Amino acid sequence: MTDAGRGTAGRGAAGERATVLWRRFFRTRTGPFFGGILLVLVAVTILAPLLAPHSPIRQYLDHTLEPPSARFPLGTDDLGRDLLSRLLHGGRITLLAAFVSVGAATAIGLPVGMISGMLGGRGDIWIMHAVNALLSFPSVLLAFAISALIGPSLAVVVLAISIVFAPRMARFARGQTLVVRETPFVEAARATGASLRRLIFRHVLPNIAAPMLVEASLGVGYAALIEASISFLGAGIQPPRSSWGLMIKEGFGYMDSAPWVAIAPGAAILLLTLCVNVLGDTVRDVFDPKVRL
Amino acid sequence: MLVTLLPGDAVNALLAAAEGLDHRVEESLRLQFGLDRPLAVRYVQWLGRLSVGDLGRSLLSRQPVLDTILARLPVTIILTAGAIFLSLAIGIPLGLLAGMRPNSPADRLLSAVAALGVATPSFWLGILLGFVFAQSLGWLPSFGYRGPGEGGFWLMTQHMLLPWLTLSAARIVEVVRQVRSGTVEIMTQDFIRTARAKGLPERLVIWKHALKNVLVPVITVTGLAVGHLLSGAVVVEVIFLLPGMGTLVVEAVLQRDFPVTQGVVLTGAVATIGASLLADALYGLLDPRIRYD
């Protein structure tokens, strides 16, 4: 970290640190590369209505299960719908579900974990019992059951994935909090009579924000996989809407005659998860001053 | 046991809500009842019956849930156990290979493959494997199950090979990563240097000294991964049409067969907890430094 002292003059310590982190980020080759791909992915799905060559639900019934062509760049499915258009529109659902559910899970899990970690003692033990009990249910099975039983819709899918993820985030946040709790500066703050609230907001939160961010970004990839799994099992997004998992399900029956129907959405999930995972790992390294980049 | 079940409240209550009611009435009733007292009562009743080993009867087949689960259990056990075996049998040697020579071409190739492996939706991988090895090459059957009792071990293996590979893919990657990082760390330790210095052949250094230390955490993590494997098994069973607990629960959930759903989810949770307890116990046995007082 030889460049730590070379910050731009006239900016605050926080700004200086951000500059250093950015510089470290761009020094990794993987970070900007996969970050760029992720941005493109997000952009094309947001702009899906503008970019899609066809309507995602329009059925060209004399063009069913066609291989990729100039008119249908990724081919068509069994109902003659354009796969590229469905992929772009489905990506909005998959990405939305993944990001929103991980965000919601963090919003619930982070405070619970921090409070549990700072409280210690009996409160901590009981909260962690509850968290571990929730974690003992197989995740896909739990999300699938919740989603199917309430009645599948995008909101329910998001709710189900959030329920699966919130305890994970809580346990992670607690683990991080326990580390910060034992540091001298927290002890000092405690000794000067800082309230629990102040301890959490001033001292714990800023110090666990980076690892939480990494954990959440890794969670986005996993959430996309769960969404895909429950849609594949028939309890996620319902037709005629599309999500990448649902598209794999729809293509599954036509693997012998039209394998591209299932291959394209699977590749899209793979790409999304790969980007998010590599990016998460890179950001972890960027924040870790012990790692030389 | 009780602690485990308590936080499942919301879910179980949800599942218990419409026991024995007409399908159309169900939806409105579930909304109406919410988390009202009758639900709690039903839930407590369910717990009470559970304590004497009664899981109730299926709403559809009228068979006792316990019998149904026991009939399906062997398939899921064979699937999961085989996947665990494969993940260790493939993952450990590859992890050692990568960890012995960090940053060698083999190591880089393996970590690239690992990054891809983590990001691949397992069911999509299963569909692709089926497409390549069953449909295109015709080497293996693409679906169906033959128990060890019907046609012998080899016929079973032929049918299970693709499901095993599909389910274990993500685990193999995890094991490779863990063994790799463990090996890298161990190889710099003093006792390895001592072993080398006293002229022990490299093979013995690895097998006798390094491996023992690397494997202990692998066993723990394998125990903790049983929950993930069970989640994966649900999807894998659906793809390859295996008559296990996964296909059972998917049917049950989609047809709103609450007692069966509850039974399977509970069995999954018990298996998850049991496996992690077992891993903890093994951990203590294998590593004499760990004591449970």
Image (tube, coloured by chain):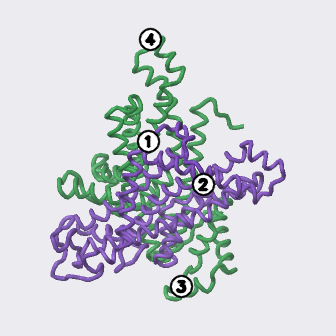
The nearer-to-camera label among 1 and 3 is: 1
Asked if labels 4 and 2 touch by Cβ distance under 8 angstroms, the answer is no
Pinpoint residue B74: horizontal percent, then vertical percent.
43, 55
Residue sitting at 62 percent across and 52 percent down?
A12
Q: Amino acid at mark 2?
A: Ala
SS type, badge 4: loop
Mark 3–mark 2 contact, CB under 8 Å?
no
In this figure, which residue is indicated by the disc labeled 4?
B199
Badge 3, how many Cα within 10 Å: few under 14, some, many 20+? Answer: some
State the residue lying farthest toward the top: B198
Nearest to N terminus: mark 4 or mark 3: 3
Q: Compute the Cα span from label 4 to label 3.
A: 74 Å
Of residues B34 and B160, the one nearer the viewer is: B34
Gap in angstroms between the C-alphas marked 1 and 4: 30 Å
**Residue that numbered label 2 is attached to:** A209
Residue B125's spot in the image, x, y percent? Answer: 32, 56
Local crowd at mark 1 within 10 Å, few (<14), some, or many (≥20)?
Answer: many
**Disc number for residue B175:** 1
The reply to whether the C-beta atoms of the residues labelled 1 and 4 are less than 8 Å apart is no
Tell me if label 1 and label 3 are in contact, CB under 8 Å: no
Q: Which residue is mark 3?
A: B26
- Pointer 4 and pointer 3 on the same chain: yes
Tag 2 secondary structure: helix
